[in-house]
Amino acid sequence: MTAMNEPRPAVNAGKLWSGGAATAAVAALIAIAGILFGRGLFDIDVLAPKGEGTWGDASTGWYAFGAAMAALVVTGLAHVLLVTTPRPMRFFGWVVALGTVVAMLAPFVTDASLGSRLYTAGLNMILGIAIGSLVAGVAKSSLIRVARPQTPGPYPRTYS
């Protein structure tokens, strides 16, 4: 049997998406903890001016919401790749890595202070690593291996 004729593994969608929802919760909490850590401990302007206080303004909630949505989008990407592409986890890794790099570079197109841009880029890196690794683990564990049918070789079996 050639590689093209091998059955594709099935995906346990419930397991994949429940893991994706858990990853979304973790990502939102990482974002909130990261913002509180930066503002409260280092007095760095993360997403809002210092005058807004440790909790900041609505941008804190939106940042956490965005992190959670990113986790769900990445889960959807993993699902699509698992059912449509060869070597899906290799493509998944590349997409997540490049998306993380873009998220890390995004703060540098703003006019915020250098400290704020560096901290936000670091927070985005931590979020990308967390989301990518958690969803990758869930995606691999959600695969259902399909047994390959036994086909006889080109020659009859000899019995002794």
Image (cartoon, rainbow, N blue to C red):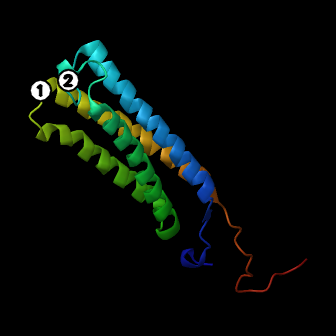
Residue 140 seen anywhere in this rendered image of the structure: no
Q: Is residue 44 above or below residue 160?
A: above
Q: Nearer the viewer, residue 49 or 134?
A: 49
Q: Residue at x 71, y 82 (%)?
A: 153
Snapshot quadrant of residue 35: top left
Q: Is residue 124 left or right of residue 87?
A: left
Closer to us: 99 or 57: 57
Label 2 or label 1, whichever comes before in sequence order: 2
Check the image and name the residue furthest to the right. Answer: 160
Q: Which residue is mark 2?
A: 45
Tag 1: amino acid = Ser
- Going by the numbered disc 2, the residue's amino acid type is Asp
Q: Residues within 10 Å of mark 2 (few under 14, many from 20)?
A: many
Distance of label 2 from label 1 (alpha carbons): 8 Å
> Which percent across, then down, holds residue 152?
75, 82
Kindly check if marks 2 and 1 are in contact, taking CB atoms under 8 A apart as contact.
yes
Disc number placed over residue 113 in the picture, else none:
1
Which element carries disc 2, helix, strand or loop? loop
> Residue drawn 63% across and 78% down?
1
In the depicted structure, whether residue 54 falls above or below residue 1: above
Mark 1 crowdedness (10 Å alpha carbons): few <14, some 14-19, many ≥20: few
Q: Residue at x 46, y 58 (%)?
A: 76
